[in-house]
Amino acid sequence: MLLKLALLEDIKAGKVDVIFRRWNRPTVKSGGTLKTKLGLLSIKSVVDMSADEVTDADAKRAGFKDVADFRKWLDTMKGGSLFQRIEVGFADEA
């Protein structure tokens, strides 16, 4: 899973703790970790869901202003048959 530097910085700062992904095959799993440019992320949970189930609270936890802002972002993402809500945390420095 590739994450932009600005998003990684927000995760490290504690501003973001949820990521949404749409893909054909997941690349992370609950309880795992992900090595990034800034350090190690912990993958706390991975939940299959529909994009229609995203709430304002979830959108804000992911760094969006609201669900409408989230949907604008989602429209720019490539397609996939699986949509997931992923809870993350910053685990360790790089």
Image: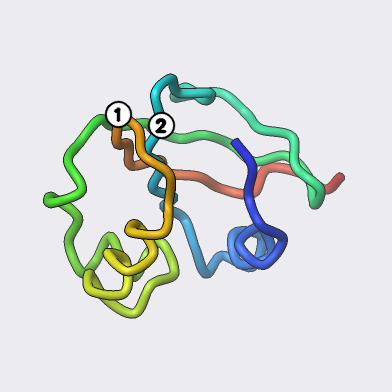
Q: Residues within 10 Å of mark 1 (few under 14, many from 20)?
A: some
Callout count: 2
Q: Residue at x 75, y 42 (%)?
A: 36
82 and 63: which is toward the camera: 82
Label drawn at residue 82: 1
Image quadrant containing the C terminus:
top right
Q: Is the residue under label 2 in contact with that under label 1 (CB below 8 Å)?
A: yes
Label drawn at residue 23: 2
The image position of residue 59, as x and y in percent, is 30, 65
Q: Residues within 10 Å of mark 2 (few under 14, many from 20)?
A: some
16 and 22: which is toward the camera: 22
Image position of 5 (left or right of 73): right
The image position of residue 46, as x and y in percent, is 37, 31
What distance separates the C-alpha of mark 1 from that of mark 2?
5 Å
Q: Residue at x 34, y 57 (%)?
A: 74
Kind of residue at disc 2:
Trp
- Assign a secondary structure to mark 2: strand
The image position of residue 89, as x and y in percent, is 56, 48
